[in-house]
Amino acid sequence: MTTNEMLQVVNPATGEPITFLPAASADDVSKAAEQARQVHEAGVWSRLPVRERGAVLLRLADLMERDAEILARLESEDAGKPITECRTGDVPGAIESIRWFAEAADKVFGRLAPSGPDALGLMSREPVGVVAAILPWNYPLAMTAWKVGPALAAGNCLLVKPAEATPRSALHLAELATEAGLPEGVLTVLPGYGRTAGVALARDPLVGALSFTGSTATGRSILKAAADSNFKRVSLEMGGKSPQVLMADALSYGDELIGNMIEAAFLTMGQNCTAGSRVLVHRDIAEEVVERFTAAARELVIGDPADPHTQMGPLIDHAAFDRVAGAVEAARAGGAQIHTGGLPHGLPPRGAYYPPTVITRAPDGSDVLTKELFGPVVTIQTFTSEDEAVRGANATEYGLAASLWTRDLDTALRLARGIEAGVVSVNAYSEGDITTPFGGWKQSGFGGVEKSTNAFDQWTREKTVWIRTR
């Protein structure tokens, strides 16, 4: 790195620095992009037989498995995530992503046009070349793997800017990729600030495609920067304000329902783009749902992320705490009822801890109902008809995910068709698995999806070759 600026990585649980890293400058980004261009044109990766690329990525997955505990601890320390969540969810999911895309690399086929006997129309998919990814801090390793897997399997050279708060797992992944045999310059991790390294990636004329996961505001600025530079292809996975819709028969699922609701609401302390932060419940069962859900929220174990028993760690920083606390207190002042949570008492003295918070009677238009707070705050509203439930589910600018609960198949299909979201889960909180596309509607997504073979679309270009036969 040529910059003198440093990046401070802070443990959210203590507020103490973990390490200092050189922050990539705009010049560093430019040099990395030029190196990636040269490597791509040399063909050491892009022209490597696809199964050989897959073999390198499979070795990478094996090495990640070997270092799974190291990766889990890096995730937990940097992001404040409970270590058990990292060990059982984030790290295994990241390994699965790399392995799945390695095995899918030779299963992405071109097309043949119905051109008749005097011509042959071949449509093939080729790597874009130099591509980039800008990552969030809530799932640092998993999001890196979602982008590294298909981008490298397709034959690109990838520049990765991890979130400034959580760069270490991506850096370790890059070290493992080198150990696995990935040629130098194929994967470059550039820890840095969005205002410098992120902007530079969005504006760099050598970057042909950029995938971003993060806030809607930043997504808009990236799209504008791409338009102002080389019209690079941009795919955006942004915010969410996901509904959990409970029909009148939902309580027949008992503890399974409540457990899924808790996971949807409070996984990663609610710092999750698909967090089910809006519960819409049929009036007939609302009282019991509020009582049972609130009781379960109170039972969550809040504490040191390094403790395997901890279920709720701190928010990423005190700015996040202030944002969440301010929205809750504004709702309270507007007449909302806070059933649990609110301003914390008896929590760990250091770190940005905020308790799981359940709210009813939130004022119309309040931030707790309309904004992606990225914290452990859930509102509960009631409805009496399917139409009212769908209107409530769609009453947001976002459309990333939704979940709904009913035993009636016809009702489930009607609701799933009516809800405006890229992923709708029925009788579960789920984003699907690695085989299914993940992406949002409305202001939650733009330009591409993660996971499944559809993810290759954002990292490849289609070429038509027309052959005249005689």
Image (cartoon, rainbow, N blue to C red):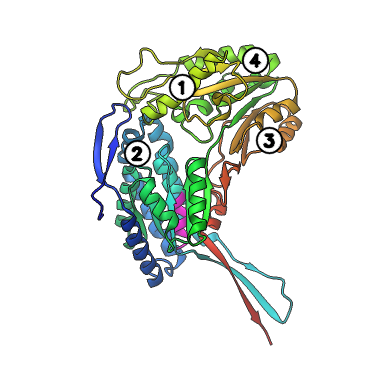
Disc 1, disc 4: CB below 8 Å? no
Return the disc, 1 or 2, that comes first in the chain's sequence: 2
To which quarter of the image does residue 116 belong? bottom right
Return the disc, 3 or 4, that comes first in the chain's sequence: 4
Amino acid type assigned to the residue bearing label 3 in the image: Ile
The residue that label 1 is drawn on is 326
Look at the image and tell me in which quarter the C terminus lies. Answer: bottom right
In 3D space, how far apart are the residues under numbered discs 3 and 4 (Cα atoms)?
21 Å
Amino acid type assigned to the residue bearing label 1 in the image: Gly
Left or right relative to 15: residue 223: right
Asked whether 259 falls inside the magenta stretch, the response is no
Task: Count numbered badges in the picture.
Answer: 4
Amino acid type assigned to the residue bearing label 2 in the image: Ala
- Dot 4: within a 10 Å radius of its alpha carbon, few (fewer than 14), some, or many (20 or more) residues? some
Label 4: which secondary element:
helix
- Dot 1: within a 10 Å radius of its alpha carbon, few (fewer than 14), some, or many (20 or more) residues? some
The residue that label 2 is drawn on is 165
Disc 4, disc 2: CB below 8 Å? no
Query: In terms of depth relative to the viewer, which is nearer, 198 or 224?
Result: 224
Label 3: which secondary element:
loop
Q: What residue is rendered at 31% in x and 51% in y?
A: 24
Asked whether 155 falls inside the magenta stretch, the response is yes
Residue 137 seen in this snapshot = yes
Amino acid type assigned to the residue bearing label 4 in the image: Ala
**Rendered image: mark on residue 419:** 3
Q: What residue is rendered at 42% in x and 59% in y?
A: 204
Label 2: which secondary element:
loop
The residue that label 4 is drawn on is 286
User: In this rendering, which labeled residue sits more in front, label 4 or label 2?
Assistant: 2
Residue 130 position within the rendered picture, expressed as x and y whole percent measured from the top left: 43, 62
Q: Which residues are magenta?
A: 147-156
